[in-house]
Amino acid sequence: MKRFAAIVRVTIRQTLSLKRALGLMLLAGSPAAMYLLYMIGTRGTSARNIETAFETSIGMTVGVFMNIVVPVVTLIIASSVLGDERRDNTMSFLVLRPIRRYMIAAAKTTAAFLEAFLITGVGAAAFGILVGIAVDTFAYFVPLLVGTAIGTAAYAALFVPLGYLLKRATLIGLTYVFIWENGIAAAVPALASLSPWRIGVSAMAGLAPDDFFDLVPSDFALGSLTPGAGGAVIKALILVALSAAFMAAVLRRRDLAT
Amino acid sequence: MTENPALVADPTVEVTGVSKWFGQKVAVSDVTCSFGPGLTGLLGPNGAGKTTLLRMLTGLILPSQGEVLIKGALPRAEVDRYRNIGFVPEESALYNTLTARQYVAYAATLTGLSDPEDAADRAIETVELTEDANRQIGGFSKGMRQRTKVAAALVHDPEILVLDEPLNGTDPVQRAHLIGLFGRLAAEGNTVIVSSHVLQEVERMTDRVIAIVDGKLAAAGDIAAIRRAMSDIPYRVLIECNKSRHFAAALLDSEAVYSVSVDNSRLRLETSDLLGLGSIVSRLARDLDVRISKFAPEDESLESVFRYLVGGR
């Protein structure tokens, strides 16, 4: 456990510089900033009522925050936790120690999740607070945080190996987010279990009040998934375990040439 | 003792018929050698395949063909084997945001030492980096970075130490200190394998050399023995004397001498028979009343051996 914690600690320290954290915080905070502008812009006008504020918040949550901010922030962080080790030639330091490869992979995925959720979680909390103020209820606050955490974990599971295996991981990751999440997985609902966005949304939907689906097209946002935090947690954990097992196999078999 | 000079009697690291190719490029070709307690220099020009071979020894790279065994086992098969191995890679391999102490303690923690901080302090002291131990590695000079890597490789007292160009970037004082350190570790019974393309460095560290040229084992053994084995290549001898031109003409008449060049009082000879030349020189010197102030083979330096090995490339 000491070694696992050490890898997590050093990884976070190495990959989350203050500059990067601030930049990603700005990105994660952008839905909250946009919502604040919306609140200020519609204050005292007929366009501003609880229904429209609620409708706007759900659209931004599902369509912007969960669909763009969470994957992009997680992509940038997760692709660097092992990718930077490869690029900086520090992998040999890590793998020439008496540590199981699965532990390295699991520690790296954990570090990616913690780092990314530190950013996405703050963004979700800021957004959730503003929505709560605007719609007079905080019933969506916890579902948003849980959905964000689960989405972040699922994306981290995908992007950690991507960052290690591919040189243009960010570009390919972005292509994945837009083509897979919004194209292929949307067109084939049976693939929803492989869509971290939909897994996160299903967790949120399972915890949110019933009126959530009045505003979200469930066939697009959930595909074949049923709302429920428990199922979403299990799916995310399966993705994390598969990712760590795959990365462990890669670390065991792949050469580490200079 | 085994007859093959590339093999040692009590090996801790065994390399058998190892080749490695990357696509069309053959980096290492059919190398068989072994390493045991003591210090062995792995010598070769840049691009000879030293780094690839060392990375195969540690398990970072798997051979395309052949086998590497560390204490009888494949290095990658059982990660616990890494408790016995310390590796200093040629590349940076450092976390720039950490201090030297944190980096070495991290290595100690990952190796499972019970008191990583204490072990780190001792390793840092060994490489004489204590004063800078709390500075971030990102601000270190090349020599300090090298010493930090050496400290991290030593922190768990490994039985086998693999060092890829460990003296790169170090100043003469640091170099002398590290050479002494590697020698001490070898004398304590550890297997120390040091690669270098700088001949004088290897020569200062050890007599036992494995020379790699173009990915192939070019020579192995102690430097003088390698030179002696190259019977088809003439020995070069330097003689300093008076009456040099007169003496050179007389030497040329001898069958043992292939050629002589004269540079003031210095003669440079090429001969196939070093022992025979000694008696001819002393006889002729006596007969011609020549005073010899120096008689030295120029060939038993590593540099000349190496020049022969890579000659023409």
Image: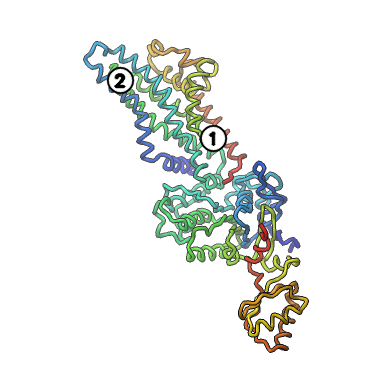
Residue closest to the eye, B203 or B104: B203
| Label annotation for residue B224 | none
Q: Quadrant of residue A137?
A: top left
Can residue A49 be seen at all in this image of the molecule?
Answer: yes
Q: Residues within 10 Å of mark 2 (few under 14, many from 20)?
A: some
Identify residue type, mark 1: Leu
- Can you identify the residue that label 1 sits on? A166
Residue closest to the eye, B151 or B235: B235
Q: Quadrant of residue B242?
A: bottom right
Question: In the displayed structure, would residue B270 be above or below residue B67?
Answer: below
Question: In the displayed structure, would residue B42 be above or below residue A142?
Answer: below
Can residue A230 be seen at all in this image of the molecule?
Answer: no
Question: In the displayed structure, would residue A245 be above or below residue A177?
Answer: below
Residue lying at 65% horizontally and 41% vertically, measured from the top left: B23
Q: Find the residue positioned furthest to the right.
A: B255
Identify residue type, mark 2: Gly
Q: Earlier in the sequence, mark 1 or mark 2?
A: 2
Label 1 marks which chain's residue? Answer: A
Kindly report which numbered mark, 1 or 2, lies closer to the viewer in this rendering: 1
Q: Position of residue B201 (x, y in %)?
A: 57, 64
Label 2 marks which chain's residue? Answer: A
Q: Position of residue B246 (x, y in %)?
A: 68, 83
Residue closest to the eye, A167 or B135: A167
Question: In the displayed structure, would residue B29 be above or below residue B2?
Answer: above
Q: Residues within 10 Å of mark 1 (few under 14, many from 20)?
A: some
- Can you identify the residue that label 2 sits on? A132
